[in-house]
Each structure stands twice: as structure tokens, then as C-alpha cells.
């Protein structure tokens, strides 16, 4: 319990801090939630620039590639209506959204990559020597 409260207070990368939760809930209303559990908010009044500010509160680690394309378009004012009201229609050739896995254990590693610990140098490999 104490550990989770301390994480909320001090770690912005592991979800929203208590200050961010308070601020967003105070000034904006929740518009919707995606399949991952990220919550999306919009301020009721336009800012100085003339547009309503939009926010996302991540469910867990704050990684922008975890935002699906339809919500990304809404956050950046590409779409006026949020996907909770006007769902994004996928084409038959489109694949479902996947987050960027670079830097994780699930990242794709090509054959013979040195990042793959099980891979050894090929038998025909000869290392360079400055004396040769």
C-alpha cells in the first residue's frame, strides 16, 4: 500500500503522479478509455490557441506507442469526435495496433544478431587483425 502511494507521488513514468491525476481530473472531463486501459480527457473550454486541450493518462508505463491510432488522431485534433463516439473503421488490410517493443525482451532480433545471446559467430567468420 505505502509502496504504491510512493510510486504515485514520485514516478511519472509508471502512470500518472498524484499531482497529475488531481490536475487533469480538476480541469478536464473523461472522454473515453481504450482497450489497454489508457484514459482520455478533454478540457471543456478552449485554451488561448483556440482549441480544447486533450490528455491521456496511461495505464501503467508511460509509453506513447501504446496509444492506438484512433485515439492518437483524436489527441492531435485530426478527428473531431473521439473513438468512443465515432469508432475508427479498420480497413481489411490493416493489422491491429501493437505497441513499440524496441528495448524490451520482446523486441524482434534478426538471425545472427549479437543481441540474441544464443547466437554465436558463423563458422566462416574470421575476425579482422591489423597485422594481416
Image (cartoon, rainbow, N blue to C red):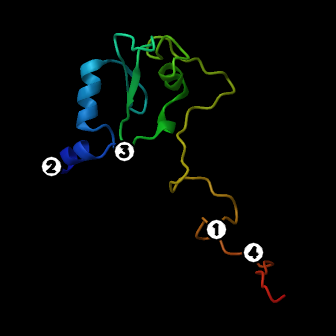
Which is more N-terminal, label 1 or label 3? 3
69 sits to left or right of 113? left
Q: Are marks 3 and 1 in contact (CB under 8 Å)?
A: no
- Distance, label 1 to label 2, CA atoms, is 41 Å
Alpha-carbon span between mark 3 and mark 1: 29 Å
Whether 51 is drawn above or below 26: the answer is above
Q: Position of residue 82 (x, y in %)?
A: 46, 15
Alpha carbon distance from label 4 to label 3: 40 Å
Mark 3 vs mark 1: give the one in front.
Answer: 3
Is disc 4 placed on a helix, strand or loop? loop
Distance between the Cα atoms at labels 2 and 3? Answer: 18 Å
Which mark is on residue 13?
A: 3
* Residue density around tag 3, few if under 14, some if 14–19, many if 20 or more, within 10 Å: some
The extreme front residue here reads 48
**How many discs mark residues in the rendered view?**
4
Q: Which residue is mark 1?
A: 114
Depth check: 2 or 85 in front? Answer: 2
Q: What residue is shown with label 4?
A: 122
Q: Earlier in the sequence, mark 4 or mark 3?
A: 3
- Residue underneath mark 2: 2
- Mark 2 or 4 closer to N-term? 2
Q: Nearer the viewer, mark 4 or mark 3?
A: 3
Amino acid at each position: 500500500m505505502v509502496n504504491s502511494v510512493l510510486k504515485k507521488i514520485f514516478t511519472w513514468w509508471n502512470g500518472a503522479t498524484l499531482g497529475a491525476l488531481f490536475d487533469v481530473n480538476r480541469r478536464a472531463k473523461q472522454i473515453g478509455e481504450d482497450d489497454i486501459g489508457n484514459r482520455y480527457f478533454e478540457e471543456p473550454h478552449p485554451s488561448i490557441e483556440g482549441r480544447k486541450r486533450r490528455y491521456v493518462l496511461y495505464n501503467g508505463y508511460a509509453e506513447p506507442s501504446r496509444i492506438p491510432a484512433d485515439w492518437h488522431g483524436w489527441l492531435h485534433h485530426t478527428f473531431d469526435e473521439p473513438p468512443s463516439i465515432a469508432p475508427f473503421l479498420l480497413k481489411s488490410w490493416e493489422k491491429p495496433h501493437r505497441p513499440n517493443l524496441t528495448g524490451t525482451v520482446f523486441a524482434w532480433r534478426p538471425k545472427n544478431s549479437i543481441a540474441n545471446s544464443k547466437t554465436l559467430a558463423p563458422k566462416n567468420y574470421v575476425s579482422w587483425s591489423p597485422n594481416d
